[in-house]
């Protein structure tokens, strides 16, 4: 069984924040920020237009995206935590190197 988002919904998994700072110091769990970078796990079949047609989504499975810290609805499935968000909640698609 798998999770398949509907319409313009996207299933993402946040990319874990670094546990060490660039200077090599360990950051306590409570002090770590929610990561804004996420990997797209699954996408819906498209956004319904006024004329009833479907507009394909811009993001694709495997894309790395930036999302707001409090975006989406948290879902637990098979001991993993995912977020379901709308495509319009995606701030940017990361191309090339990771942020």
Image (cartoon, rainbow, N blue to C red):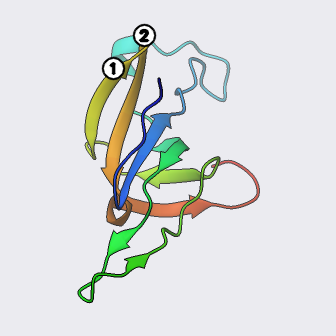
Residue 15 x %, y %: 54, 32
Q: Is residue 89 above or below residue 77?
A: below
In the picture, measured across the screen, residue 50 lies left or right of residue 14, that is left
**Is 67 left or right of 96, judged from the image as shown?**
left
Q: Rounded to the nearest whole Å, what is the CA distance between mark 2 and mark 1? A: 6 Å
Instruction: Give the crowd class for mark 1: few <14, some 14-19, many >=20 residues within 10 Å.
Output: few
Task: In this rendered view, identify the residue nearer to me: 46 or 65.
Answer: 46
Classed neighbour count for the residue bearing mark 2: other residues with Cα under 10 Å, few (<14), some (14–19), many (≥20): few
Answer yes or no: is residue 33 visible.
Answer: no
Task: Look at 59% across and 57% down and name the residue there.
Answer: 60
User: Which residue is painted at 56% across and 17% down in the image?
Assistant: 19
The answer to whether residue 37 is left or right of residue 61 is left
Mark 1 lies on residue: 76
Q: Residue 45 at x, y = what percent?
A: 44, 60
Contact between labelled residues 1 and 2, with CB atoms less than 8 Å apart? yes
As drawn, which residue projects farthest toward the bottom?
Answer: 51
Reading the image, the residue beneath label 2 is 79
Q: Nearer the viewer, residue 8 or 25?
A: 8
Q: In this rendered view, identify the residue nearer to me: 80 or 71.
A: 80
Where does residue 84 sit, x and y in percent of width and height? 33, 42
The answer to whether residue 15 is seen in the rendering is yes
Residue drawn at x 67%, y 18% is 24
Classify mark 1: helix, strand or loop: strand
Q: Nearer the viewer, residue 69 or 14?
A: 14
Identify the residue at horizontal 35%, vertical 70% (top origin): 47
Measured as percent of width and height from the top left, residue 53 is found at 36, 81
- The label shown at residue 62 is none
Quarter-wise, where is residue 52 in the image? bottom left
Specify the quadrant of the image occupied by residue 18.
Answer: top right
Q: Secondary structure at mark 2?
A: loop
């Amino acid at each position: 069984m798998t999770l398949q988002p509907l319409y313009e919904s996207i299933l993402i998994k946040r990319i874990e924040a670094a546990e060490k700072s660039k200077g090599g110091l360990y950051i306590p769990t409570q002090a770590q920020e929610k990561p804004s970078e996420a990997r797209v796990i699954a996408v819906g079949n498209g956004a319904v237009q006024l004329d009833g047609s479907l507009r394909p989504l811009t993001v694709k499975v495997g894309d790395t995206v930036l999302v707001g810290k409090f975006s989406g609805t948290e879902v637990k499935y098979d001991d993993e935590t995912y977020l379901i968000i709308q495509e319009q909640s995606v701030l940017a698609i990361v191309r090339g190197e990771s942020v």
